[in-house]
Amino acid sequence: MRLGAGAGCGDLVYVTVGTGIGAGVISGGRPVHGLLHPEAGHMKLRRHPADVDFAGVCPFHGDCCEGLASGPAIAARSGAPAEALDRDHPHWAIVADTLGQLCAALTLALSPQRMVLGGGVMNRGHLFPAIRTAAAEALGGYIAPLRERAAVDALIVPPRCPVPGLAGAFLLAIDAAHSSAGWASGSPEG
């Protein structure tokens, strides 16, 4: 939100696609928490027509988003890890469709200004155009500001921070230190 592709966005979703699928949500500049953290990876979505026979790998839901498009799902479906598949392997169309539907569902539910997709699976940059296409198709023109492809391209982006986990942890530590120093000194500026 501060250093990478979400800079300047008060309403942001970061989706990580790797061993699992998770989402961090920022609304009004603040992280969204509730009963738990958002568990967007466990949403059930429409199955890709070429993927009806794969049970999915999620031990809780089988064919939720994580069960269909995470790194372990890709390996279970194809018999090879994601990094070993050629960019034209047919399983990428299934993954892109699933992730595009996830992006559409999160857009409809949360209305973010930007959606950043990172994680090991997303290191395959060729997925972004197909994910954006699938998201636009799933939205069906419903959201007027996203009817143009350029707007969808600007909404769904890769991270621009090379080590987002480390950078985020560092920024949280700085925030905590400032907060702690302000509390200890009684200064509201900290």
Image (cartoon, rainbow, N blue to C red):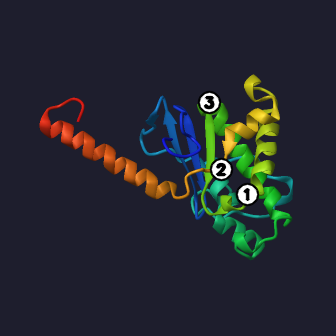
Which residue in the rendered view is the most extreme toward the left? 185
Q: How far apart are marks 2 and 3 (CA)?
A: 18 Å
Q: Looking at the image, which residue is at 62% across and 37% down?
A: 114
Pointer 1 residue: 125
Pointer 2 residue: 158
Q: Position of residue 32 (x, y in %)?
A: 46, 37
Q: Where is residue 9 in the image (x, y as percent from the top left)?
A: 55, 33
Report the quarter where the C terminus lies. Answer: top left
Q: What's the amino acid at mark 3? A: Ser
| Label 1 element class | loop
Quick one: label 2 or label 3, which is nearer the N terminus? 3
Q: Is residue 190 left or right of residue 167?
A: left
Residue 111 circle label: 3
Q: Looking at the image, which residue is at 67% across and 45% down?
A: 157
Q: Where is residue 149 in the image (x, y as percent from the top left)?
A: 81, 35
Q: Which of marks 1 and 3 is in front?
A: 1
Q: Position of residue 143 (x, y in %)?
A: 74, 26
Quick one: label 2 or label 1, which is nearer the N terminus? 1
Q: How far apart are marks 1 and 3 (CA)?
A: 24 Å
Q: Distance between the residues labelled 2 and 1?
A: 8 Å
Q: Looking at the image, which residue is at 57% across and 59% down?
A: 60
Mark 2 near mark 1, Cβ–Cβ under 8 Å?
yes
| Label 2 element class | loop
**What count of labels does the image hold?**
3
